[in-house]
Image: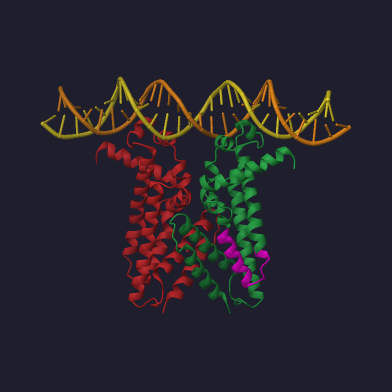
Chain colours: A green, B red, C yellow, D orange
DNA sequence: GACAGAATAGCACGATCGTGCTATTCATGG
DNA sequence: CCATGAATAGCACGATCGTGCTATTCTGTC
């Protein structure tokens, strides 16, 4: 890896952490530069604009999400076990990255009213994630673990709701029972889907 | 109402709308002033600091939430009907205000990593809302509409999850089926709680 | 080890930020 | 209608923003 590419990665890593706290819009090139002991223009040169930087952070985050959540989930046995793994891995993922919260939850809330490439990309990533959840549920149906009248997309929708509320209970409310509530909701959802 | 108080209200109204789009942190006094055709200092004089402005916006939003959501909800018959009213009124509420999305959902996501008075206030308001939902569920139990082993707080938690995911499906994903999915999830939740 | 190109720094720009201070205009009670 | 205080404007401040341009330093190749 060339020198430039290496520092680019370092920048992205730090920017990603920062963005998960202050949002993609709250990022400042100056602060980023001084935190990394780079000159503002030196840092800027790696990207052509702030928006390009933001898009690259998004891709960086997506890549990490694949590594830390999607990949391990796909190693679980298909069907209900994999749905369970998805939920568990998602719960752990912000902690694993020792961030404040899930980068994508923050980005989604921030960008939902700002049309543009950033918003499109975030929406696309969320759709991918939902589709993956739906697919796992679909498999659970064909494996005859879930009832055949379960709507996989509705299942993904409902499961995603539990993830979002868990994020709020954890991050905003700092509720110590957040995880317990999360699992109770999840178990009820799965139980209702089981044949 | 004195002149000053009147413009203060006008400012808050506009600021509230603006904040629901760009967030409380994304607000700028300069932009606010020029949009309202006021001088920056003239506007600023109504508040002693930006944070004071933000806190007043929060209170303004809370007041509107009471008027548009809480009050009509309490007019529905207690028990399941009231839970249903709460859900329905919440779904309608951002539309009613013709905002992008729910002000509080945006504020919650933005502030969950920023300790301070703002965060505390938002968390308090969310807790109040959750408590109200739990109380309605509790009443549904004593009215013998819900099973006695239903956990009211878990119910509120789960219901709030549906609200959050609906917000995402509507705002970020622009999914035309968002409301349909919302109601399906809600009906399943209520059906599971019914005796 | 010199040379070429990549990587980084330095500096400047116009704009905007939040916030004070002072002046001016306005509303309102006597 | 006048006087007084409230409401608003004008202006300035230091800081920071994103982004260019030019110079310097460093890296990797022959």
On the picture, is A129 further left or further right than B82?
A: right
A74 falls in the magenta region: yes
Q: What stretch is highlighted in magenta?
A: A73-92
Q: In this view, does B173 lie above or below B14?
A: below
User: Looking at the rendering, in which quadrant would you find the N terminus of chain A?
Assistant: top right
The image quarter containing residue B46 is top left
Q: Which of A6 and B112 is in front in this view?
A: A6
B144 falls in the magenta region: no
Q: Where is residue A35 in the image (x, y as percent from the top left)?
A: 57, 38
Q: Where is residue B121 in the image (x, y as percent from the top left)?
A: 37, 51
Chief SS of the magenta region: helix
Q: Residue at x 43, y 68 (%)?
A: B154
Can the viewer see residue B37? Answer: no
Can the viewer see residue A135? Answer: yes
Q: Position of residue A163 (x, y in %)?
A: 53, 61
On the picture, is D25 further left or further right than A107?
A: right
User: Looking at the rendering, in which quadrant would you find the C terminus of chain A?
Assistant: bottom right
On the picture, is C20 further left or further right than A126?
A: left
């Amino acid at each position: 890896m060339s020198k430039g590419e290496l520092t680019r990665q370092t920048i992205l890593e730090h920017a990603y952490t920062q963005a998960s706290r202050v949002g993609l819009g709250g990022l400042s090139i100056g602060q980023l530069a001084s935190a990394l002991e780079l000159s503002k223009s030196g840092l800027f040169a790696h990207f052509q604009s702030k928006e390009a930087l933001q898009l690259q952070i998004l891709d960086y985050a997506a890549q990490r999400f694949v590594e830390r959540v999607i990949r391990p989930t796909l190693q679980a046995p298909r069907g209900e076990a994999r749905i369970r793994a998805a939920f568990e891995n998602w719960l752990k993922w912000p902690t694993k990255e020792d961030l404040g919260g899930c980068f994508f939850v923050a980005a989604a809330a921030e960008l939902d009213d700002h049309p543009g490439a950033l918003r499109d990309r975030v929406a696309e990533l969320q759709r991918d994630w939902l589709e993956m959840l739906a697919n796992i549920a679909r498999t659970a149906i064909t494996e005859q673990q879930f009832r055949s009248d379960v709507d996989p997309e509705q299942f993904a929708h409902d499961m995603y709701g539990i993830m979002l509320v868990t994020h709020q209970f954890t991050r905003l409310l700092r509720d110590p029972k957040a995880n317990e509530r999360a699992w109770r909701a999840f178990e009820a959802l799965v139980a209702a889907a089981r044949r």
